[in-house]
Image (spheres, grey):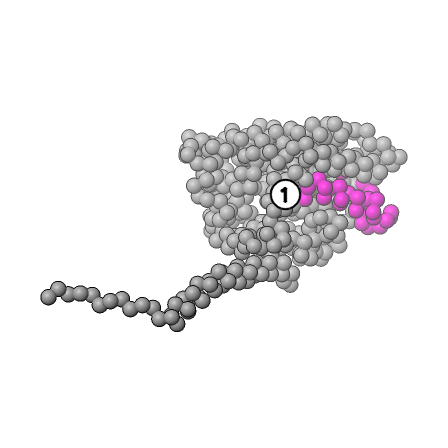
Amino acid sequence: MPHTAPPLSAPSPAMSSRTRTIARRIPLVIVLVLICLAGLDAAVYHLLPRLPGLPPAVRDRLLDWDAIDRTALPGYRPWLGGLVGEPGQEPFSRTVDASARAHGVVLADPPTVILAATDALGWQNTGTPATAKVLFLGDSACQGLGSGTAAAIPALYEAATGESVYAACHSGYGLEQYAAILRRLTVDAPAGTAGRFAGDTIYVLLSADGDASAPGTPFARSDAANQGWLRHGRLSTLARLARGLVGRDNPPESGAYPVPLTAPTWHDLPFAFHPAYRAFADTAWFGPDQEQAAKASLAELVRLAKAAGARLRVVIVPTALQVVYPRIDFAKVSRRTDFARLADDETRNLNAISATVLQLLAEAGIPALDLTRPFMDDPRAATLYWPTDPHLTPQGNAAAVAAITATLWPAQPAESRSGSTTP
């Protein structure tokens, strides 16, 4: 006789009730897990920078990853809206491989530089503002993150001219910070004190990819969108920390590494162009509002320099992409990659921002030097930047100082202490 399957037994009422209860609780469990993760994200973001003894190199990497709250760091100054070093900090070393790490490349022997101890104001100097004839304001290009303090632009300028220099430089600065620092070192510092600059020349070093466009920096929108619980609800801190620990924030198929050049580079390595350059593929974020903000900061710098009786000079420091673009061997770069598709737009937009800033400087009556053309015309152009990092090499700093001293020093006698600053 044919086999018949036994009839399916109906679920017991108790089992159905448990199933329904579990099903109802799953969304609640998911919500609770997300709340806990958001809380962990917030704790890491706000508490990690407060840990005592956080090494400067680790701190800088966490800042690069946007994995910690910069306002919680001991070096954050509300009046500046940015960081300075803690006074009395010991010298520390830094590996010059930020671009390589962004592509997940681990160098067996990365270049390493030494940043000097910090002074009473938190910057890396042996003298004081009061003893300096020349003041340098700038970001990481001025600080010497690619060269170390002893081979940074301010130190090489002092050696070339014999004029004593004070450098108020730190990564992340922009036009607003330069005005705040100049105010702090002049009108806000009591006359005759060690913290008051009484020299006759002020140089502002503007990096084309960051502070030259400040406060219209391309990261401002993303930073604003990532604040508060919206940031933590997205688990942005944990995601960025994990990405940083893995050592890659740029997909390998982007084509931004390895990029071979037709000219010699450091150790003949191909270039790793930093993922931050992607922000310049479309510069719709730099509009009239940003130009007006830049004008206001420049006007404040002019006013403060005039009050101090010092002449003001501005130097635009180009990016590696702007300088070595003509030396990229595009025949060996896949045309299907984002880099091959966007490099031209990125370079053109960076040059356009530099040109806009130069126009604003001319309108403000500030003598200025754009290092883009001198660097591009230098036969050693590919060695002026690290292929592993976006910063200038010591050779690049030396080339910058040579151009500055040839063009802006001594451009004219120092203005009298009556306050005239006609350039």
Q: Residue at x 74, y 27 (%)?
A: 363
Q: Residue at x 47, y 48 (%)?
A: 105
Where is the N terminus found, in terms of image quarters?
Answer: bottom left
In the rendered image, the vertical position of residue 294 relative to residue 80, given as above or below: above
Q: Secondary structure at mark 1?
A: helix
x and y percentages locating residue 361 in the rendered image: 72, 30
Magenta range: 173-202
- Amino acid type indicated by mark 1: Ala
Q: Nearer the viewer, residue 297 or 403?
A: 297
In the displayed orientation, state which residue is furthest to the right.
418
Q: Is any part of residue 24 visible from this angle? A: yes
Tell me the crowding category of disc 1: few under 14, some 14 to 19, or many 20 or more residues within 10 angstroms, Cα based. few
Q: Is residue 251 above or below residue 40?
A: above
Residue at the location (39% across, 72% down)?
Answer: 14
Residue drawn at the location 72% of the way across and 44% of the way down: 177
For the question of whether residue 164 can be seen, the reply is no
Q: Nearer the viewer, residue 235 or 268?
A: 235
Depicted 378 relative to depicted 84: above or below:
above
Q: Percent from the top left, x then y, of residue 167?
A: 72, 45
Q: Position of residue 211 (x, y in %)?
A: 66, 39
Q: Is residue 191 left or right of residue 326?
A: right
- As for residue 190 lying within the magenta part, the answer is yes
Quadrant holding the C terminus: top right
Establish if 297 lies above or below 374.
below
Indicate the position of residue 257 as horizontal and vertical percent values.
46, 41
Which residue matches tag 1? 220
Q: Compare residues 190 and 23 and report the one nearer the observer.
A: 23
Q: Nearer the viewer, residue 157 or 272?
A: 272
Q: Is residue 40 left or right of residue 255?
A: right
- Find out whether residue 353 is within the magenta segment: no
